[in-house]
Image (tube, coloured by chain):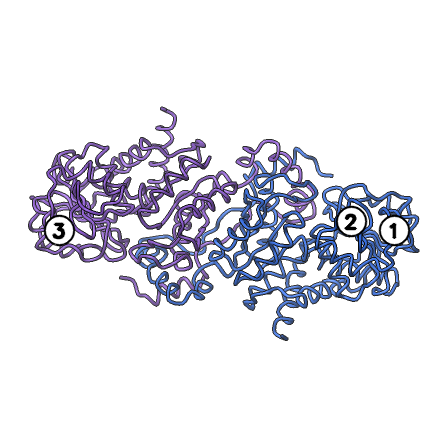
Chain colours: A blue, B purple
Amino acid sequence: MINRSKILASHKKTRGKIAIKSKMPLRNRQDLSIAYTPGVAEVAKEIAKYPAKAYSYTNKGNLVAIVSDGTAVLGLGDVGPEAALPVMEGKALLFKELADVDAVPICINTKDVNEIVKLVKQIEPNFGGINLEDISAPRCFAIEARLKKELKIPVFHDDQHGTAIVVLAGLINAAKVVKKNLKKLKVVVCGAGASGTATTKMLYSYGIKNIVVTDSKGIIYLGRKGLNKYKKELAKITNKKRIKGKLAKALKDADVFIGLSNPKLVTKAMVKSMAKDPIIFALANPVPEIMPQDAKQAGAKVIATGRSDFPNQINNVWGYPGVFKGVFTVGAKQITDKMKIAAAEAVAAYVKKPTNKCFVPDSLDKKIVNVVAQAIIKTYKKK
Amino acid sequence: MINRSKILASHKKTRGKIAIKSKMPLRNRQDLSIAYTPGVAEVAKEIAKYPAKAYSYTNKGNLVAIVSDGTAVLGLGDVGPEAALPVMEGKALLFKELADVDAVPICINTKDVNEIVKLVKQIEPNFGGINLEDISAPRCFAIEARLKKELKIPVFHDDQHGTAIVVLAGLINAAKVVKKNLKKLKVVVCGAGASGTATTKMLYSYGIKNIVVTDSKGIIYLGRKGLNKYKKELAKITNKKRIKGKLAKALKDADVFIGLSNPKLVTKAMVKSMAKDPIIFALANPVPEIMPQDAKQAGAKVIATGRSDFPNQINNVWGYPGVFKGVFTVGAKQITDKMKIAAAEAVAAYVKKPTNKCFVPDSLDKKIVNVVAQAIIKTYKKK
């Protein structure tokens, strides 16, 4: 773990992580009359006539709003919009450094679904795409669904779909490492929030049908009391045998643990109870469900976390920069399921010979962005 | 006038005028674990505990939202939020280049006062200040008043107060050029929108009591039918003799014409009817109320426009960058009338020997920003 005071000092030194950069010179009056008055009136008139030209004459077509209400920030929970700011700035930094996509945090102080949808619609003119971030479930599902329907620009909830893409990519390669048939794996997804729900759905639609999902109350099964409509949907496609009980019961004989929940939920004993050569993705941030050394001691064959300071980081950073780069390149108005699966397969295929020491790309490998962008572009052109 | 196709081509070449810039390095996993997970969790926790620390650990304290609904863009009127984008990007470019203040356009597609106020409150956490821009009167007055009261960060409607600052600065020096007593000038303000209203109020509070304001219906006087509450307020402090009629009548024997209205409203004959050595500020953009050569031929002694491609440009660019720089430097939560007057006096005093050829600063003189910022800072410290 990096030193806390060093982290704070780094942020204080630069007062955050992103700033504005000029793209047009401003050396003299002529420059000023082009960039601002009177010249800019010509640009305004042109866009008033043809609104789509905002994509040519302004930064709209390369600009993402990272929208969060601060209710589910990392593993910290509801810390509020101000505390979400450094996280969203970090995301914007990664968008810029990895994909040359511009992004600005829009951290908002309302948690009301209707208000959030209305606000994003009201600010839509500025942006080429919306990246929803760290909004707690189940509100995030309703917000995303409505925005996808009501906006003219692509909407992507990274906690859901970004996570689903990179987990599927990681699992494709982990199955190769342990030489098991991917589609026959018995998978336990721990966490039925944004990322757990979307990951489960993506694995299922990819052909992995033997999945059990757990939440804070234990195993989800059809008929369990108090399931909201999103968990009911999960119950319909998972846990066919309707087993009941806690996480420990779900893990018995499972091939894969995918943790998208809370720190320290998994014990060595649970790992030992799994099938041969267990695959452990302990992705809770910043503290994983089980520490890698403990998982290893308990016999895990392939281990990943969500942390930059451990090996085999499964990181959304492979996903969203390339997704938006691809989408912006072709001007796609939706990010489809086919695009997401194509992105996952492309990330997996990028690691030529996956081993348990290294089965996923390095988080800062800048080539991944283009790998994903190309997958998105190809899928878009095929439609 | 600059060539239209050159203006459009310049904007297309760079796809707009601003982008995002990184302030923190991202060279390796250690950098990533500081800027993003897991390290950033420490910053989020710190701000969750002490929200004011967002000013130290994020870009909030240097970031302005340029909020517009696109209803009064330049002199073009209600062109909508997309068409407002290139103008707001231009403004952001100037903020950056002149004051190193970061600003992002927030062009919104609602014109409802309550909705706009609510939206700005909802996005407040991201920003250190709000610059309202190109929102039509009289809605802009209500929006600004409510935001000043309801937000914890400074709010500045540049069309109002930025214009008032630079017009007062220009007029202080123009009076010196024609050797007339500033406070005894007979002033006609043409236009009772955002800028005309605020300018009139500022001139009045500065001691210039002989002012007549005109709008599209002619001279404003107490008792004129159909005046809204803002124009009624103007009527109370102007036109003591309650003269009635059109602009031409108001201009007879006037010392100063301040045009903040529409193109081509003023004829040579009107200028000829003014008092000796008329001062003409024809500030409509992009086309002034009277072209400078016509005003000169008709005998105007001091002439200014709002355009970068004519001499003596009276430009808001002297105002807002330094105002926000000053306010951000000291962490002021309000931009007060005293600060605005101090800014105007500082800009005027910066031109050591005003002449009719040059009585205002060059728009791109980067020293003006600090002159204004220092005036703001001094005034803040005096309080």
Please name whichever residue, B272 or B149, is drawn nearer the observer in this view of the structure: B149
**Labels 1 and 2 in the same subunit:** yes
Q: Is residue B142 left or right of residue A366?
A: left
Q: Is residue B350 left or right of residue B183?
A: right
Sequence-wise, which precedes: disc 1 or disc 2?
A: 2
Which-is-in-front pick, marks 1 and 2? 2
Q: Amino acid at mark 1?
A: Leu
Q: What mark, if any, has residue A251 been given in the picture?
A: 1
- Residue A296: image location, x then y, percent: 88, 47
- Seen at 73% across and 58% down, the residue is A233
Callout 1 touching callout 2 (CB < 8 Å): no
**Labels 2 and 3 in the same subunit:** no
At numbered mark 1, what does the secondary structure look like: helix, strand or loop? Answer: helix
- Residue A108: image location, x then y, percent: 54, 44
At numbered mark 3, what does the secondary structure look like: helix, strand or loop? Answer: loop
Q: Amino acid at mark 2?
A: Lys
Residue furthest to the bottom in view is A382
- Residue B354: image location, x then y, percent: 19, 40
Could you classify mark 2 by the number of other residues whose Cα lies within 10 Å: few (under 14), some (14-19), or many (20 or more)?
Answer: few
At numbered mark 2, what does the secondary structure look like: helix, strand or loop? Answer: loop
Q: Amino acid at mark 3?
A: Lys
Please name whichever residue, B347 or A107, is drawn nearer the observer in this view of the structure: A107
The residue wearing badge 3 is B246
The residue wearing badge 2 is A225
Instruction: Determine the CA span between mark 2 and mark 3.
Output: 76 Å
* Chain containing mark 1: A
**Labels 3 and 1 in the same subunit:** no
Q: Compared with residue A304, is residue B157 higher up or lower down, i.e. above or below?
A: above
Callout 3 touching callout 1 (CB < 8 Å): no
Q: Is residue B15 left or right of residue B292?
A: right
Q: Which quarter shows the C terminus of chain B? A: top left
Please name whichever residue, A46 or A197, is drawn nearer the observer in this view of the structure: A197
